[in-house]
Amino acid sequence: MRLTGRAASDTVSMARLAAAGRAQGSPGDLLTAVGAAPSWVPPLLDPLALVGQVQPGLPGALGRLAGRGVVACSNDTWAAVAGLGALRPGYAYNISGTTEVFGAVGAEPVQAQGLMTVDWGKGNHQIGGPGQNGADTIAWLLPLLGKAGRAGHSDEPGMAGVAEAMDALLNAPRDPQPALFLPYLQGERVPYWDPQLRGAFVGLNRRHGPGDLAWAVLEGVAFLNRTVLARAEAALGAPVAEIRFGGGAASNPHWCQVKADICERAVVVGQADQPGIIGAAAAAWTALGRYDSFAQAQDALARPARRYDPDPTRRDAYTRMYEQFRAAEAALTPVSHALSALRLP
């Protein structure tokens, strides 16, 4: 509003509200139910639409931008999909930080159980969405093993310390009998939408040590990725070409390779540490005519840095482990529900 004098949002960030409006008659139905006024919702623009120009007389550095165009774009997470170069049919995206965002993109809108859909228009339709448990599972594991400080504490090691701690764990000898990890430390959103799910290590033996637990955590998140990918690809009717991967976990080569091996798709990590900024730039340059299409802008700006191809020697073992991961999910879901309702005196 202050930049252009016009209040507006975009159809991607506000997709859930738009869907509720279509389902219930008007967005006002949902807003009225929570005691809000329908007038609070601004006009929703295409993400590549021009909102207006920066007004003159703004303070500081903004004053030097007077007359420049302002593009709607979207929120940081969905802009990051474009910043990874994945907002094109045939690609999957994975942004792994505090949450785990995973999905695929098709030319037509489709639906799948437990997955969200986000419509960018012009042949770009996301299916997937955010989960609760991504790289944050490592933030939980490391201090539990005495390897790093908790976030927000004075002994927090930073990303460099996390990487060093993880490398030490993952480079230790691994027991040939694997353990499984169900990563539901905070319940789960996509694809289960179940706040009462709980995490678990399954199959521990006396030989297992910290390194085995670290591998199980990496693999558990990747097994969940595989479930989301399988549902998305089934809905789209075709496999994706590759998974574009960003966020804090993408800096760990072990996790990149694990995801490639378990999902059986190449994983490509971009050069940019902040793909959301690249996605916003791609949207802006497309809207202003610098590039003929959003896909062309992504080709130019979302530059790959590293590629991890699936290791065929791991395929059979990971297939069997995934089957047991799914079996453990089914068996332990009622236990999770029961435990989540218990309170100690």
Image (spheres, grey):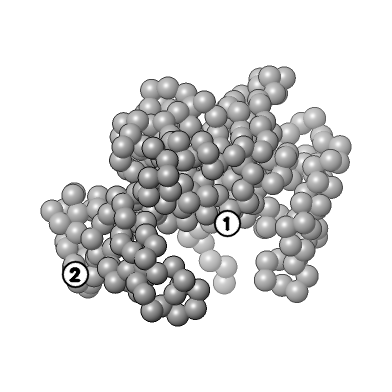
Q: Residue at x 18, y 49 (%)?
A: 22
Say what amino acid the circle numbered 2 marks: Ser
Q: In the drawing, does residue 91 fall left or right of residue 307?
A: left
Q: Residues within 10 Å of mark 1 (few under 14, many from 20)?
A: some
Quadrant where the image shows the N terminus: bottom left
Residue 14 x %, y %:
31, 56
Location of mark 2 (residue): 39
Say what amino acid the circle numbered 1 marks: Thr
Q: Which mark is residue 203?
A: none
Circles 2 and 1 in contact, beta carbons < 8 Å: no
Q: Residue at x 48, y 51 (%)?
A: 281
Element at label 2: helix
Q: Nearer the viewer, residue 178 or 295?
A: 295
Location of mark 1 (residue): 98
Q: Residue at x 17, y 63 (%)?
A: 28
Label 2 to label 1: alpha-carbon separation: 33 Å
Note whether 148 is above or below 300 in the view shown.
below
Q: Residues within 10 Å of mark 2 (few under 14, many from 20)?
A: few
Residue 207 x %, y %:
84, 40
Looking at the image, is mark 2 or mark 1 earlier in the sequence? 2
Note whether 322 is above or below 31 in the view shown.
above
Note whether 80 is above or below 244 in the view shown.
below
- Is residue 212 in view from this perspective? yes
Residue 249 x %, y %:
65, 48
Residue 328 x %, y %:
57, 37
Instruction: Determine which quarter of the picture holds residue 344.
Output: bottom right
Instruction: Determine which quarter of the picture holds residue 179.
Output: top right
Q: Nearer the viewer, residue 288 or 145?
A: 288
Q: Which is closer to the viewer, label 2 or label 1?
A: 2
